[in-house]
Amino acid sequence: MKTLFERTQGLTDIPFHYCPGCTHGIIHRIIGEVLEELHLLENTVGVTGVGCAGFAEQYINVDFQGSAHGRAPAVATGIKRAHPELVVFTYQGDGDMVSIGLAEAVHAAARGEKITAFLVNNANYGMTGGQMAPTTLIGQKTATSPYGRQSEQSGFPLDLPVLISNLPGAAYVATVTVDTPQNVFKAKRAVRQAFKTQMDGLGFSLVQFLSTCPTNWGLTPVESIQWMQDNMFPVFRIGELKQPQ
Amino acid sequence: METMFMKGNEAVAEGALQAGCRLYFGYPITPSTEIIEYMAKHLPARGGTFVQSESEVAAIYMVFGAAGSGERVMTASSGLGISLMQEGLSYMAANELPAVLVNIMRTGPGLGGLGPMQGDYFQATKGGGHGDYSLLVLAPASVQEMADLTMTAFDLADEYRNPVLILADAALGQMMEPVTFGAREPKRYDKPWATTGAKGRKRNLVTSYNLQNEVGEQKSIYLEEKYRFIQERLQWAETYQTEDAEYVLVAYGTSARIAKGVVNALRENGVKAGLVRPITLWPFPSKVFTPLNERVKGYLVVEMSAGQMIEDVRLSTEGKVPVAFYRRQGGIVPQHDEILEEFAHAFSVGGILA
Amino acid sequence: MSAMVEINADLCKGCGICVSVCPSRVLALGQVVNSQGYATAVPVLPMACTGCRYCAVMCPDVAIRVMLT
């Protein structure tokens, strides 16, 4: 009986705590698969932000450090500068990286730190119960934008990769989605490209995953994917925004 | 043996380099900036790594990452920057990460000025961040000690797996004195817990969340016992002419330099005075006070703040001995004659100034 | 070529994404509730499976194995 698909060694065997249908799980898996395929499990260190995915170190099968909220790119800088031979990546949510941690993210890219940042954007603060984040869409209702986000009061969604791709230190920047099998394959290619960019020493790499949050969006998992396609895809620039020359 | 004429700040940096500090992450701030400049110039030249961060917040988390990867690492700032680092220090204590911090204190609160002050004592010794934790805090009083205590700090950090803070001030940072560097080989400490890539071992996790309160309590008790263990072993103070002293001045850092002169003046006037100069501010050297409490008639605490270390002195006297206080603030250093005057006033020793 | 889907009922949270992406309608949410209280996905048309792996690729809990029979 030949196996066509089975769980990667890049993941531990601990079941995910994520809500049913939350696509963090898909993103964890493709990162784990790429780490296994590139034989990196023994010389990689991950850094988690704080949020739903603050527990990613339970699941992705490499050494990990847990950063304070927003500071993962700085922690990753410290690790990479201490051990340049290691592959170092951060795994952060949109609240972690695009709100409190924006300075650390932008400056890690501006310095051209040879690290990889994975940004999971579900347009809200998931763990704390669905509050507005800088990525929350105009009109999107959250626990702190109960009448729908008003640009007059709280500005516009922030697409971090668009910001980062303008920095010379950023070598590979992409926004991908995990809404369909085809796009999951594309997302996996972006993950591989990001790690390769790092290993080739070309500079900072960032992959933004548009991701769902059924619980806080108040939708079923399948409806959430539809909502993401209809509402988030038009706002965030999808594709490879920057590739190494 | 190599003797050089250096600023206190440079002595701190050279001491760190000789202690095997491999990485420096920091942000410029007067009056500590010679430290970052010295590191920028000398660390790469000696095979180390220097990064200027975008803020003190980023700096402490870069230190966190490098420390968690098992390397000797350091940062330095002044009170304002150390305030920004408090969350990071709480995280480092919780994760038991060794590193050396330096606070070249200036005046505060707020923007303050560039003069010397000792107003960050509470922040340093009572845990400026959240949760039950402590930093080991060492207080140099000379440029030589700026070098020596920094080197010692790296060993203590690795020994006890805890951040160690050097608490100095603008005067000590900017003054120049001769410094001798002995040929002291830095100790090596095995760090199996570091995140160096899980090759041939189980994964290492440097994380500090406790979702189950039962686990959280165990961790808190563990840290509490760890700090008590350190408090038992590490109570350093210089005692000067206290053997037969009837009155004892208590001061650290720059204040202690002046207080020593006051002790000599009192002795010349027939007053049996002495000085206790705490070197470890956490753990506070209360053991030194125990024998003195039995025979001393009074303590005079001298600080450059509204009075912070005085609380630890009062605790150490167990209420047995009156504690007087003299201070200047805002960047003004307490003067020799002023302290003598306060001493006479406090302890009404007749005709002292006649 | 025919293939077979195996769903780990302990990991499945009954999110229904695999059901929605399977081109051959092999899967459906069953009546059986697992230890976590989720009604897990089950193959209702196992013979129709072509081994395309869409279900496994889209499963947020890595609960699906796909084999060639």
Image (cartoon, coloured by chain):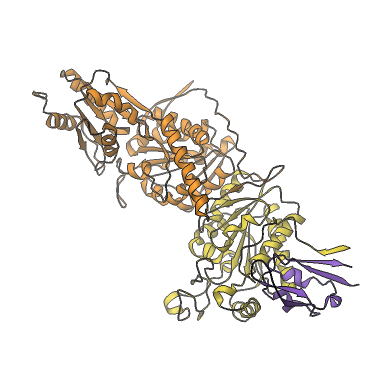
Chain colours: A yellow, B orange, C purple
Examine the rendered structure and indicate whether residue A226 appears above or below residue B192: below
Q: Is residue A200 positioned above or below A234 on the image?
A: above
Q: Position of residue B65 (x, y in %)?
A: 56, 47
**In the depicted view, which residue is nearer to us: A167 or B322?**
B322
Which one is in front, B69 or B334?
A: B69
Which residue shows up at 81% across the image and 79% down it? C24
Q: Position of residue B38 (x, y in %)?
A: 47, 38
Q: Is residue B141 visible?
A: yes
The residue sitting at 59% across, 80% down in the picture is A231
* Residue B219 % position (x, y): 50, 46
Q: Where A84 sits versus A162, above or below?
A: above
Q: In the picture shown, does residue B133 fall above or below B322? A: below
Q: Residue furthest right?
A: C1
Q: Quadrant location of residue B267?
A: top left
- Of B268 and B144, the residue lying toward us: B268
User: Is residue B141 found left or right of A79 in the rendered image?
Assistant: left
Taking depth in this image into account, of A104 and B176 the one nearest to the observer is A104
User: Which quadrant would the C terminus of chain A be assigned to in this image?
Assistant: bottom right
**Residue B285 falls in image quadrant:** top left
- Residue A170 in the figure: left or right of residue C23: left
Does residue A245 appear in the picture of this structure? no
